Image (tube, rainbow, N blue to C red):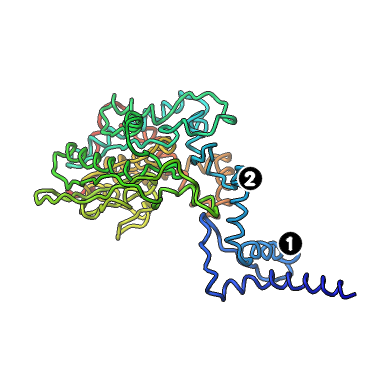
Amino acid sequence: MKKKITYSGVLFTILMVIFFLPMIQEHCRIFNFIPLNGVTQKAEIKPLTFENYKSGKWQGSVEKYISENYGFREPSIRLYNQFLWDVFRKTFSKTVVRNEDDWLFEKMFVQDYYESLQYTYSDDPAVLKDKFTKEAKRLYFLQEILKEYGKQIFVLVEPGKGEIYPEHLPKNKKYNRIKYLSAVDYYPHLFDSLHVNHINVNTWFKQMKDTASFNLYPQTGTHWSNIAAAYVTDSVIRYMEKLGDKNITNIAIGKPYESENRKPDADLEGLLNLQRDIHLDKPNQYVDITIIPDSTAIHPRFVVVGDSYLWNVSYIVPLQKIFNKCTYWYYNSTIYWDSTYKSTSEITDLANVLLNTDYIMISYCSATIYNLGNNFISKALLSLCYSNDQIDSVVQSIEKEIMNSSEDMEDLKKKARAKGMQIEDMVREESYNRLYQNPEKYFVELSGNSIPLSRNKNIQK
């Protein structure tokens, strides 16, 4: 009888400890655990109503809330992830791929290296070649029109980790489709033939990889390394000087030195939420950057439209000391470092915004360049050639085409429900997408090989 009481008491005590762990963790300051990395949504318990109880929504919300708020959740998850990593060489991450030598890659770079991301957009290489050719031609038109106003635009063709370090990629056991077309290889040929301003960092990194004394990409990160970002920035500034025939403030790059991982060199490792740091083949190297004083240098206004590579540059380069204004149009959507706009959707007079800058850089890597500019090129070209009224008139005609198609409307109704949008807003969004994807269809002047002569009459001289 005593043993039964003892066992019951122990079991009761364990259950109570587990039950009160969240309160213990919350109210005891000694338990300050490092938050888990990754995107999370705060779990909330739905109101206890008859309908919610009957449908099971209340029970489901309680279960989710408990799973997100149980005591000592952070260390327990990290310990479990470490166990999977050490014993089974596995992770729960859907985006991070691990190689046998503990080099980490973002999944899309592995996929692009082995079979190309062309299959995400089309199974037919000819379709993609046509898409790339049209985009490059639009960019050339945009470049030449901007020159009329004394503005410069160029492309920074960023590499991808898989392109530079294929020897560290996981062995190809999954991807077996033929690699017909790679955008990071095809676009530069188009740029050369059309005389589009660009810097091909992908080719540059491949050439210097074997002779460089430092890693161009960190072992556990997805973007270029600290030192690589520094040298790219120096080259970009010098290229801008040549392009615009201007003297711009330059940077001085110090001597490399070894150090522990710095943000964001272990951004992929951080997503794994491990208990211990991954052992590196060799320590990462870093450089310090200083501004070269030059009273004759100008401080131009600079807009960057691109993917996440610029973040690494912003951590090490004092951009505010080089440029009068530097704004970051992240995937041509969210706008950073701008007191006027938070999103490109807020800009109603794109032409004059562009003409109020000096340099524009479109910056995409091997895995993101398939969608070069994220419609920025078409939008910018249209805004310089045509007024908002002309563009709106075309959009309205596209809306009528869509609404007269039962098939289109049925498809858009499903998309609207999935996004929680009104069907009218969904139709308008689709109309703009069709215009930006194929502006030549609606403005015939853009389909030729000559630079368009039309100009937006509302451009401020």
Toward the viewer: 19 or 422? Answer: 19
Q: Is residue 126 left or right of residue 288?
A: right
State the CA–CA distance, disc 1 to disc 2: 41 Å
Toward the viewer: 20 or 301? Answer: 20
Q: Is residue 162 left or right of residue 21?
A: left
Toward the viewer: 338 or 255? Answer: 255
Rendered location of residue 304, percent (x, y): 31, 46
Instruction: Say if 72 sits above or below 163 in the image.
Output: below
Q: Quadrant of residue 369?
A: top left
Query: Tags 1 and 2 in contact by the CB under 8 Å rule?
Result: no
The residue indicated by pointer 1 is 55
Task: Give the numbered dot on residue 87.
Answer: 2
Q: Which of the two discs, 1 and 2, labels the residue nearer the N terminus?
A: 1
Amino acid at the residue labelled 1? Ser
Q: Residue at x 44, y 49 (%)?
A: 266
Instruction: Say if 11 sits above or below 322 in the image.
Output: below
Quadrant including the N terminus: bottom right
**Mark nearer the viewer, 1 or 2:** 2
Q: Is residue 317 left or right of residue 32?
A: left
